[in-house]
Amino acid sequence: MRGVQVAVLAKAPLAGFAKTRLIPALGAPGAARLQRRLTRGAVRCALDARVGSVTLWCAPHTQLRFFRAVHKTTGVQCVAQPSGDLGERMHTAFRLHCAQGPLLLIGTDCPVLCPVHLRKAAQALIDGDDAVFYPAEDGGYVLVGLRRPQPALFDAMTWSTADVMSRTRARAREQGLQVREFETLWDVDVPDDLSRLDALNHEASA
């Protein structure tokens, strides 16, 4: 399974830049601290899955102190996210990585995503599926994996809406892709998600 790469898309944990929808509940510094913790957790999950090389795609650039620290402590390569909307940035990651083999792409918003999820997705790609997904409860997805670039899945998509996953399914069918979907997971985007995150943290520390 070592041939499946993992890319983590991450915003820098800067006050007012990351997790802005949580600022009303946490304040800008608190939202930035949460982003820092979630990013480290996502990188740790990707490394612990041991499915292949891990790359951290950084916004706005790689030279921020936090990203340099992640590289120093984990050895993960940091790459600057390109310009464009989320779909353009995700497609760029697949276009560049898939030249070397299949890629799993994750963000930093899903604290329940764990190494076993990545291993299952990687195995599905190795077994021949064209695309794999872990849908999100909010209608998007927390993981997408592809054997080769599929620009039709990302082009002109309205992101952060409740029909992202359903529209992605329809596009995949139109392209004739063999798709594997796994269980639906939840992510942390809005203040209502924080109570579940607190419960998860309490359970982990118990």
Image: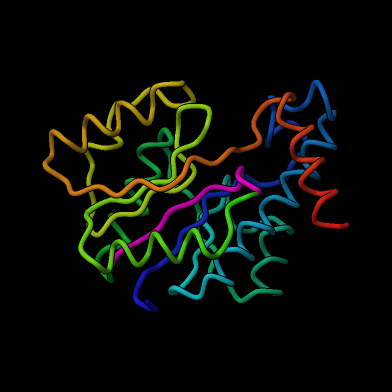
- Identify the residue at image location x=72%, y=66%: 69
> Split into 4 quadrants, where in the image is the C terminus?
bottom right
> Split into 4 quadrants, where in the image is the N terminus?
bottom left
Q: Give the range drawn in magenta.
A: 102-111
Please, is residue 18 above or below residue 24 in the view? below
Residue pushed farthest right?
Answer: 206
Residue 24 is inside the magenta segment:
no
Determine which quarter of the picture holds residue 72: bottom right
> Where does the image place residue 92, in percent across and percent down from the top left?
34, 49
- Identify the residue at image location x=47%, y=61%: 118
> Where does the image place residue 110, in percent across and percent down from the top left?
60, 45
Residue 109 is inside the magenta segment:
yes
Determine which quarter of the picture holds residue 101: bottom left
- Identify the residue at image location x=74%, y=41%: 14
> Where does the image place residue 128, in percent across and percent down from the top left?
20, 63
> Where does the image place residue 198, in percent across and percent down from the top left?
82, 40
Q: Who is closer to the viewer here, 151 or 172?
A: 172
Q: Who is closer to the viewer here, 74 or 125?
A: 125
Please, is residue 15 above or below residue 24 in the view? below
Is 48 on the left or on the right of 145, as rendered? right
Is 5 on the left or on the right of 200, as rendered? left
